Every structure is written in structure tokens, then in C-alpha cells.
Image (cartoon, rainbow, N blue to C red):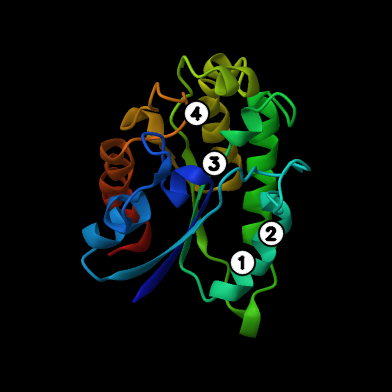
Amino acid sequence: MKTILCFGDSLTWGYDPQGPGRHALEDRWPSVLGCALLGKAQVIAEGLNGRTTAFDDFTAGVDRNGARLLPSILSTHAPLDLVIIMLGTNDMKLFLCGHAIGAAKGMRRLVEIVQTHVYPLEQEAPKVLILSPPHAVATPDGDFQQVFDGAVEESAKLARLYREVAEVSGTGFFDAASVAKASPIDGVHLDAANTRSIGEALAGPVKEILAL
């Protein structure tokens, strides 16, 4: 059986903007992907609310810097066949980065970590699939408007920049914005139907990457 690690933020954790709360396990995209693979792969969900690609958030009570946490997570779950990374939305926060190019630089660093990490028992590095997250959308929520000011325009640039990262680093790429849209309730999170859509859409590319 293959092992897949899904490394992400609240979109992977399953944050429900309608609650606010957490989507049912069966509605989160890693779970949907696992079901679509018909038992041929173990899908591990490593989602953390607020996680960034490579930026520190000192307002949080936990470490949200993906680049700092990823090495330990890779060793924890090894051996791995595929690492799917969907991050960048929180990089759009003005007080952290606020620019798509910063997220792209962070994503490049994450890919480098996966490809060069010293894995237990000299295991080979897993393959990587970069996911560009759904774009931020306009919202009447005042707090999210301020925190993500400019994110509607900047997040729309992520797919092009992430595709370039994938081409340079030799990884797979999928634009989640092609199958899912953020909820206008807060402008960044997904309802159950849209998070399920990501898992369903990934089944084909993942099967191809892993020859399932």
C-alpha cells in the first residue's frame, strides 16, 4: 500500500466557515481522496489552522511555520510515496507576507525540504504534488477583510507561480481553484461541497503519479 502525506493549513484541517467549526471527517478532502483510491493508499492529513509555507506567526500559540515543522513530520510518517502540499493562503496575510511571490518562494523551500531530507533507513525521497489553493474572494467579514487585504488579487497569482515552481523542481502541479471556490462567509475557507471537490479531483492525478 502506498502512503500519501497531505501537508496543509485549515483547508486541509477542514475548517468550516459556516460554523465556525470543523467539517465531518468524511467531507475533508484528504478523506475523500483516500476513499477515491479504493484502499490502495493510506492518506495522512497533516493540516494546521494558520500554517504558512515558511513565515513565522508570533500571534499564534503554536508554530505555524511549515518549513520548520516539515522535516519532523516527514520523518514521523516515513516511508512516504507522495507528499501533497497545499499552502499559501495564510501567506497572504498582510502582517506575515501579503504577496504571492513570497508564498512561491516558501513553496520552493518546502519542495527542497522534501527532496533533500535525510529519511530514516536511507529511504528514497517521496514524489511531490503542489496544490495551488482556491483564490480568496470578497467577504463582508470585517476581520477577514483587514487580515487578508489584497489577498483577492494576490492569491489569483499563485497558480502561475506554483506551476513555475513545479516545472523547475520536477514535481506535479494541480490548481485547486479549478474545482473549488472559497466561501464568501469569510473569503478564504471552503464549505463541505468545495473541500470534497478537491479530494475527488485529485484522485486521477494521484493515481497517475503513483501508478495505481
Mark 4 and mark 3 in contact (Cβ < 8 Å)? no
Mark 2 and mark 1 in contact (Cβ < 8 Å)? yes
Report x, y in % for residue 168. Answer: 60, 40
Relative to 73, say whether 175 is above or below. above
Mark 1 Cα within 10 Å, few/some/many (few <14, many 20+)? some
Q: What separation in Å lies between label 1 and label 2 (alpha carbons)?
A: 7 Å
Q: What separation in Å lies between label 1 and label 3 (alpha carbons)?
A: 21 Å
Reading the image, the residue beneath label 1 is 73
Q: Nearer the viewer, mark 1 or mark 4?
A: 1
Q: What separation in Å lies between label 1 and label 4 (alpha carbons)?
A: 25 Å
Under circle 4, the secondary element is helix
Reading the image, the residue beneath label 4 is 159
Q: What separation in Å lies between label 3 and label 4 (alpha carbons)?
A: 10 Å
Q: What separation in Å lies between label 4 and label 2 (alpha carbons)?
A: 24 Å
In terms of depth relative to the viewer, which is nearer, 27 or 173? 27
Reading the image, the residue beneath label 3 is 166
Report x, y in % for residue 169. Answer: 60, 46
Q: Earlier in the sequence, mark 1 or mark 3?
A: 1
Which residue is found at the position 70% from the left and 23% from the top? 94
Under circle 2, the secondary element is helix
Q: Nearer the viewer, mark 3 or mark 4?
A: 4
